[in-house]
Image (tube, rainbow, N blue to C red):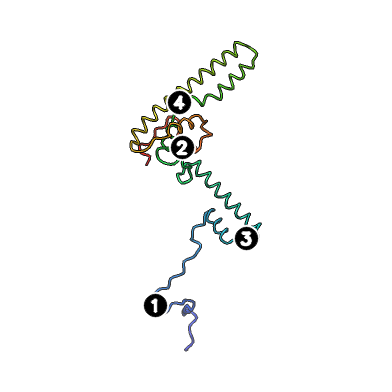
Amino acid sequence: MFRRSKSEPVPDTTSSAVPGAGPTTERPSTKGRPTPTRKEAEAMARARAKPPRTRREMAQAQRSARGESTARVKAGMKAGEERYLMARDKGPVRRFTRDFVDARFSFVELMIPILLVTMVLSYSGNAGLASFGSSVLLLAMLLVVMDMVLLRFRLRRELVARFPDDSHKGTTYYAITRAMQMRFMRLPKTQVKIGQSLPEHYR
């Protein structure tokens, strides 16, 4: 008569809740944390690495650190990051000068194809073709000189309008030497396309 009925529910003894303490909260799982990036993983791996024990290991570690630093500086220079630039390339005036040169077409970019054509004509054995090639080369050089003079005139006008209180010393030489290089050889790398309008402010 006093036996417990089989249908009577059995109390749950697995709960660790204390009466009067309110509902218990589960500890948050660590699986929800974001996966570390590759750079973070490499940094943690280097931090866990053992310090060099011998001179050879120390030299290898120093060479590796120098290599990473050099690669980082080169990448920053190519991208035009201010902190990685040389002293001659720093500042808003030099940055505008680079963009001004890169946004225009320079006749010097035609010099390599013209030189190749004139070399072929000069070695063709035909005096008339050789004379024509020399004339073309001379005309191209005159166009380049005129283009550099026009570049200096327009650049000085823009610099006076945009940076009236800054020094413009050395900007003409800086612009001409950059314009005389092919686009793929320029450092810092070009950040604008030919014909692209430049921003109003460079501060």
Per the image, the residue denoted by label 3 is 52
Q: Disc 3 and disc 2: Cα gap in Å?
A: 42 Å
Measuring 60% from the left and 54% from the top, which residue is drawn there? 62
Label 4 environment density (alpha carbons within 10 Å; few <14, some 14–19, many ≥20): many
Q: Secondary structure at mark 2?
A: loop
Whether residues under marks 4 and 1 lie with C-beta atoms below 8 angstroms apart, the answer is no
Residue 71 in percent (x, y) is at 55, 46
Residue 1 in percent (x, y) is at 47, 89
Q: Secondary structure at mark 3?
A: loop
Mark 3 or 2: the one toward you: 3
Q: Disc 2 and disc 4: Cα gap in Å?
A: 21 Å
- For residue 170, which quarter of the picture? top left
Circle 2: residue type: Gln
Q: Earlier in the sequence, mark 3 or mark 2?
A: 3
95 with respect to 38 (left or right): left
Q: Secondary structure at mark 1?
A: loop
Given the current orientation, which residue lies at the most extreme bottom position? 1
Measuring 56% from the left and 16% from the top, which residue is drawn there? 134
Circle 1: residue type: Ala
Residue 21: assigned label: 1
Mark 2 or 4: the one toward you: 4
Q: Is residue 143 above or below residue 177?
A: above
Circle 3: residue type: Pro
Whether residues under marks 2 and 4 lie with C-beta atoms below 8 angstroms apart, the answer is no
Q: Disc 4 and disc 1: Cα gap in Å?
A: 84 Å
Circle 4: residue type: Met
